[in-house]
């Protein structure tokens, strides 16, 4: 009787131990997948940081053009030719959006790997940037798009602008080529146009500030992610 009880106990312990070994193997495999995803996320974040730098450069260029144009307006249009003024008006565009590579973050969530992240600060940073800050970014972009579309409509109609388009030039959206125009001195000197430019400049500064916040968050995530992988 004792023999059978002992054998049964040994068998039970063996079964439980095999379950334990399998669970450890699965856990180790899941952690490996999580770390691989974090490495992929780091690559995506580095791409995002590069894109942010390019968008900021384009924003700064537009803000610089606005400063030049308003200076010319304030000096009664003696600083540049009609053609230069219209060309600069066309080039002003603060509706340059940053599109994050969020596919890896989505995979982290859907695969359950996000829950395996031990660093709470990293988890909070990821949730903040891909949810809260992304919603704020999209809301701001919608407002800027409305402003810029109205501005484009006004300058193209008031200056009777005709353009062609080089789709292979420029960082993101191609390049506009000014073919012809009819210069409207009254509209150029108007408070309305001056106001459109000021609104774009403010929007450019605000979006630029948001991009700076995103950069700091991404850089912090990179450091925290490396710590999580090495842990």
Image (cartoon, rainbow, N blue to C red):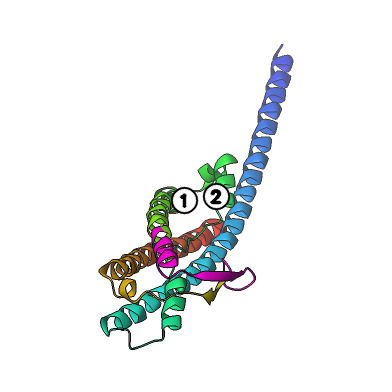
Residue 118 position within the rendered picture, expressed as x and y whole percent measured from the top left: 48, 48
Residue 13 found in image quarter: top right
Residue 200 found in image quarter: bottom left
Please give left or right for residue 208 compared with residue 38 in the image.
left
Residue 155 found in image quarter: bottom left
Helix, strand or loop under label 2: helix
Q: Is residue 192 above or below residue 7?
A: below
Choose between 108 and 9: the one closer to the eye.
Answer: 108
Magenta stretch contains residue 157? yes
Q: CA distance from mark 2 to mark 1?
A: 8 Å
Residue at 58% across, 50% down: 103
Number of other residues with Cα within 10 Å of mark 1, as a class: few under 14, some 14 to 19, many 20 or more: some
- For mark 2, what is the residue? 105
Number of other residues with Cα within 10 Å of mark 2, as a class: few under 14, some 14 to 19, many 20 or more: some
Magenta stretch contains residue 24? no
Residue 97 position within the rendered picture, expressed as x and y whole percent measured from the top left: 48, 60
Residue at 46% across, 68% down: 160
Label 2–label 1 contact, CB within 8 A:
yes
Choose between 213 and 6: the one closer to the eye.
Answer: 213
- For mark 1, what is the residue? 130
In the rendered view of the protein, which quadrant contains the N terminus? top right
Q: Is residue 35 above or below residue 218?
A: above
In the rendered view of the protein, which quadrant contains the C terminus? bottom right
Residue at 53% across, 67% down: 51
Choose between 210 and 199: the one closer to the eye.
Answer: 199
Helix, strand or loop under label 1: helix
Please give left or right for residue 157 compared with residue 112 in the image.
left
Please give left or right for residue 101 compared with residue 20 in the image.
left
Span colored in magenta: 150-175
């Amino acid at each position: 009787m004792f023999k059978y009880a002992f054998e049964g106990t040994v068998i039970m312990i063996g079964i439980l131990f095999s379950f334990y070994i399998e669970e450890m193997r699965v856990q180790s495999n899941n952690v490996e997948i999580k770390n691989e995803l974090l490495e992929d996320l780091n690559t995506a974040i580095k791409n995002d940081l590069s894109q942010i730098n390019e968008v900021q450069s384009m924003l700064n260029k537009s803000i610089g053009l606005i400063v030049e144009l308003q200076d010319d307006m304030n000096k009664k249009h003696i600083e540049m030719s009609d053609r230069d003024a219209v060309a600069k008006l066309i080039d002003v565009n603060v509706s340059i959006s940053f599109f994050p590579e969020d596919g890896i973050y989505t995979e982290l969530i859907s695969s359950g790997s996000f829950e395996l992240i031990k660093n709470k600060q990293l988890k909070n940073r990821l949730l903040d940037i891909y949810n809260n800050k992304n919603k704020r970014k999209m809301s701001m972009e919608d407002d800027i798009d409305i402003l810029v579309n109205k501005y484009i409509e006004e300058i193209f109609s008031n200056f009777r602008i005709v353009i062609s388009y080089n789709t292979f030039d420029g960082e993101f959206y191609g390049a506009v080529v000014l073919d012809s125009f009819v210069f409207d001195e009254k509209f150029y000197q108007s408070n309305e146009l001056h106001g459109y430019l000021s609104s774009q400049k403010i929007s450019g500064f605000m979006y630029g500030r948001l991009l700076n916040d995103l950069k700091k968050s991404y850089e912090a995530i990179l450091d925290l992610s490396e710590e999580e992988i090495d842990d």
